[in-house]
Image: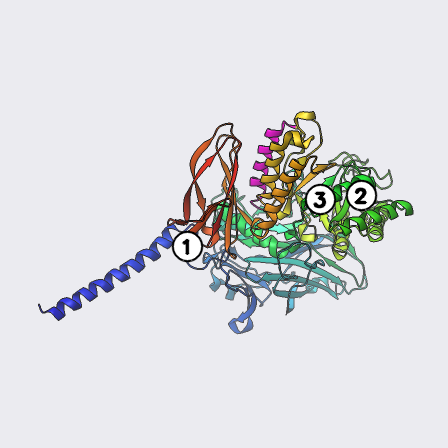
Amino acid sequence: MNQKHISNIMDGIRILYTVLFVLSFVLCCIVFSPFSSCASDWLIDSIERPAEVKTESGGNEIILTNGLVKRVFRTSPNFATVGLHNGMTNTSVLRGVKPEALLTLDGETYEVGGLKGQPEYGYFDPAWLEDMTSNPDAFQFLRYTIDTPKAPYPWTRSRYAENRPWPPNGIRLIVQYKPPNKLLPRYSGLVVSVVYELYNNLPVISKWMTVTNHTTETILIDAMKTELLAVNEWEKDRLTFEENYKHLNAPEVNPGQNVFTWEADPEYTSQVNYLLQSPILLTSQYPLGPGARLKPGESFESFRIYILLQDSDDRERQGLAVRRMMRILAPQVTENPILMHVRQSDSESIRRAIDQCAEVGFEMVIITFWSGFNIESEDPAYIARIKSDVEYAHSKGIELGGYTLMCASRDAGPDNNCISPKTNKPGSRFGQSACLASAWSGDYFERVLNFMDATGLDVIETDGPYHGDVCAATTHAHHHGLADSQWTQWKRCSEFYQECRKRGIYINTPDYYYLNGSNKCAIGYRESNFSLPRWRQILLARQNIFDGTFHKTPSMGWMFVPLVEYHGGGAAATLEPLSEHLKEFEWYLAQNFGTGVQACYRGPRLYDTEETKAVVKKWVSFYKKYRPLLDSDIIHVRRADGQNIDCMMSVNPYQKERALAMVFNPTDHAIKTKLTLPLYYTGLTHTANIREQEGSLKAYQLDRERQVDIPVNLDAKGITWFLVEE
């Protein structure tokens, strides 16, 4: 064999090795990446994925898609969803065709769109479509139009917020239906529209209905189901839902009041469940009513739903997708001002709090509950005094606002309270609630808005906003009876928040009104825990932050710090005098500012000595230095258990500083260990430069799961942090 042949063989071997190496690398990416491939990842890349509407099959099919998700509609013989595809996993979500909605008018229920004749509901074969027919008694497809999303409430970027477009970029599809022949001539002129929105770079489809009455009679909308999806069993756990009709931050307090339900599908006769009761038909509907009476010329708009398609069963990844959704669909939640709750409402106390906030870098003062503050006052002298306090706050660069009890646990008098349908007497889940659809509510909203306009308040904290109570009264000014009481109260509460949004007012509310314009609610905690001994409540609070930031961004939830006694617990539970409990106070500051979670620091002051002031300024400055990173999403590294170190890490793949890991040692002994930091969501692939606090950077090689092990050496009750750079 001559030298040339040997050289050719060696070249071939080198090429073969190169190919095998590349294939091995790709295989490793597929096998060992947490999310199935090393290709682009919508949660960390910067690829633009615009939403669009396309037509196929000669115009007989409409496709709503952005590459991440695709919803396919057939337009003939009636309008129906015939496909819902997860583009991230290349899977079909649906196993069958259902009506686009169900609408109950004047006691009779009608399908809206949909097709009939599918022979099997365990799966869907598109070939069946050619033989499927329209239900002649259903509302029939009339036309569709294409538009862009419109803002459901006003918002202009202010304070320190992400630079998100509003309304979100995307596409809107409006599908109109006409009544079936059996409803003519009475309902001639009734127009039902189903609206779909898809957003750029987000695997979320929104949907809602409008009903417009062009007839000459009043029409009663008894009930409606705005979505019916026959979901593939294996895709059920990869759907996440949101809606703007959610009342409580804690849905377990409000059983039976959920918009989304999983129901049995009687058409699915081949299912394994012997009684055909598998909950695999996803529906969205009003828990009660709406009971809306639609007069000629009026329109009714339903709640909006948002269905997020997930690409993984991983809890962290699913949470990150939810957080991305909320940043895009409710960008006002990214405002994250540093706030204090001042305990007294006299001008001297308010101004002392303003001065201290300005001194240490806080940005907002809220005159707290039980302070004597009265946002409903119509007294000119009181209004003038608060206006002067607001002007003083603004001169110091501080925003000022206050607390109001809206309706829960509030007695508005026998003519305005919620009436229990069980007893026909005043009563609710919180003992008593004012009805937000009574005459009292109109006066209440007017008083509060007038006060804010007259004083220039920047913030409102509403306690007991509308939380889902029903009312059986038949004499209230803004609802007719039980059937429309829930929808009407929610609508009036939402409209009030939107009036606040028009004014640029920051909205703190303990209930879930993000998709109606609120900024923040509680991150999730038990109030009585703040009456426990200090070190116990501190660790429990850190658990609350860890748990509450799976489905909330840090800016969406507030924590609590009892500078003075709250529900009880005495001296052992409170931080005052601050200088005598400075270690515990610093832990509270570190775990809140270090995770981007703002707390209600409730008391008369933020510091009592120069040493205390220095500690507060230290952590405020730390937060402001790393604010873009700390307002980003949290990766949950190790939950606090009181036995070892715990860690939460903020990540942002779009800036030079990619992660900041806060590490706590809650024990009474020193700990020397290694901590594994998962850096996939930093966007780093091979190397990470890491420093502890303000130390020197050290290069670390990422393993195949994009993790690094770092040494941690913490004294008893010690705190440290690690900064990760590209």
Name the outermost residue toward the bottom. 58
What is the magenta range?
Answer: 532-552
Name the outermost residue toward the left. 1
Residue 640 colored magenta?
Answer: no
Between circles 1 and 3, the one closer to the viewer is: 3
Image position, residue 198 (x, y; %): 59, 61
Where residue 227 sits, quadrant-wise, is bottom right
Name the outermost residue toward the right. 380
How far is the residue under mark 2 from the one under mark 3? Answer: 37 Å
Q: Which mark is residue 520?
A: none
Residue 534 colored magenta?
Answer: yes
* Mark 1 secondary-structure assignment: loop
Image position, residue 49 (x, y; %): 53, 64
Placement of 51 over or under 559, stated as above or below = below
Image position, residue 626 (x, y; %): 57, 50
Name which residue type carries label 3.
Answer: Cys
Instruction: Locate residue 518 relative to residue 691 in the image: left or right.
Output: right
* Mark 2 secondary-structure assignment: loop
State whether residue 106 appears in this view. Answer: no
Name which residue type carries label 2.
Answer: Cys
Q: Kindly identify which residue carries mark 1.
A: 685
Q: Quadrant of the N terminus?
A: bottom left
Q: Pick whichever of labels 2 and 3 is earlier in the sequence.
A: 3
Crowd tier of the residue under label 2, counting other residues whose Cα lies within 10 Å: few below 14, some 14–19, many 20 or above:
many
Instruction: Locate residue 283 relative to residue 94 in the image: left or right.
Output: right
Q: Kindly identify which residue carries mark 2.
A: 435
How far is the residue under mark 1 from the one under mark 3? Answer: 42 Å
Q: Pick whichever of labels 1 and 2 is earlier in the sequence.
A: 2
The chosen color scheme is: rainbow
How far is the residue under mark 1 from the one under mark 2? Answer: 56 Å
Q: Kindly identify which residue carries mark 3.
A: 357
